[in-house]
Amino acid sequence: MEIEKRKSKMTGIQQKRNEIKLKDVIEQKVHIVCDLAKVERDIQIAIKSGARKFQKEGRPYIRKKKDEGEYTTNVRCKNLGTAIIIQLEVLMKPVTPIPKNKENKIDLLAKKQYKVGNQKDIALAIPFEHEETLANGLQAFERWGFGLSRKKVLFIVSDYVTKNGIKTPFKNNISRSNWFLNFKKRHNLSIKKPQSVEYLRKAMTDPFVIKNYFKLLEKFLSDLQLNDCPSQI
């Protein structure tokens, strides 16, 4: 009898536990169903609000993007173009300041008057034939490696004008920078940065250096007794 009572108690406890578990499961399912209903309701509200917003504001802006392949090809083409331009600038850089093909250009430019700032520069303050000889001389000097600076050219022009008695509009017969700029334009000249060889040649043409050289040469010839024997030098 006691065993049967215990069994009946155990079965009663298990039934209660099972009932509690069933209640928990049912409550969870009910909560899930409620959550799903809320989610569906929120989705419908969002759709309606989005449709109203679309009707009011219009189509939303979408940023356009290029294709990656197209972008890379454009960048490559641009880089290639800039590289070609840089290479051309290096290769096509004029070496001599005075090119040879200048006759037609000089004939056209010699008839015009140029302006620098607000001042009128008189294009033919010096006769054109004298300017042409000066340009040819500068070209020859540069070819031999003795290029002249802007100050030296202006000094040569002023000296030439004063010695030959040429009437010019220059103040005190000294040519200014505006005349020099237009002189370059007329004869298609350009200023070039001197090389190291030209600096060395300029240093060696110093009269003190030349005088010292001839002194050493005279001493050397007198020591070896070769003053009257040029064939043995």
Image (tube, rainbow, N blue to C red):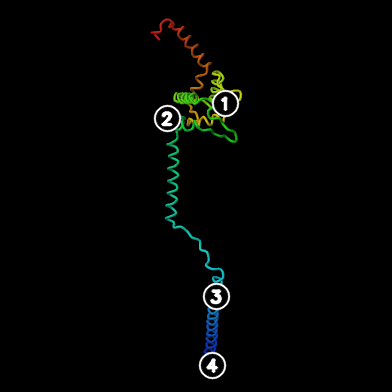
Q: Which amino acid type corresponds to the residue marked 2 in the rendered image? A: Lys
- Dot 3, crowdedness within 10 Å: few (<14), some or many (≥20)? few
Q: Earlier in the sequence, mark 1 or mark 2?
A: 2
Spatial CA distance of label 2 from label 4 is: 131 Å
**Callout 4: few (<14), some (14-19), or many (20+) C-alpha neighbours within 10 Å?**
few
Secondary structure under the numbered disc 1 in the rendered image = loop
Which percent across, then down, holds residue 213? 49, 14
SS at circle 4:
helix
Q: Which mark is residue 175?
A: 1
Q: In this view of the protein, can residue 192 be seen by the observer?
A: no
Among the two numbered marks 1 and 4 on one chain, the one whose residue lies closer to the N terminus? 4
**x, y (%) of residue 169?**
58, 26
Q: Position of residue 206 (x, y in %)?
A: 52, 18
Picture disc at residue 100: 2
Q: Quadrant of residue 173?
A: top right
Residue type highlighted by circle 4: Lys
Ranked by sequence position, the earlier of labels 4 and 3 is 4
Q: Secondary structure at mark 2?
A: loop
- Which residue corresponds to the image point at 44% horizontal and 47% vertical from the top-left? 79
Q: CA distance from mark 1 to mark 3?
A: 85 Å
Per the image, the residue denoted by label 4 is: 5
Q: Are marks 2 and 3 in contact (CB under 8 Å)?
A: no
Q: Nearer the viewer, residue 223 or 145?
A: 145
Q: CA distance from mark 4 to mark 3?
A: 64 Å
The answer to the question of whether label 1 and label 3 lie on touching residues, with beta carbons closer than 8 A, is: no
> For the residues marked 2 and 3, what is the alpha-carbon distance in whole angstroms?
81 Å
Residue mark closest to the camera, 1 vs 3: 1
Residue closest to the eye, 52 or 120: 120
Q: Distance of mark 1 from mark 2, alpha carbons?
A: 26 Å
Give amino acid for label 1: Ser
- Depth-wise, is mark 4 or mark 3 nearer the camera? 3
Residue 48's disc number: 3
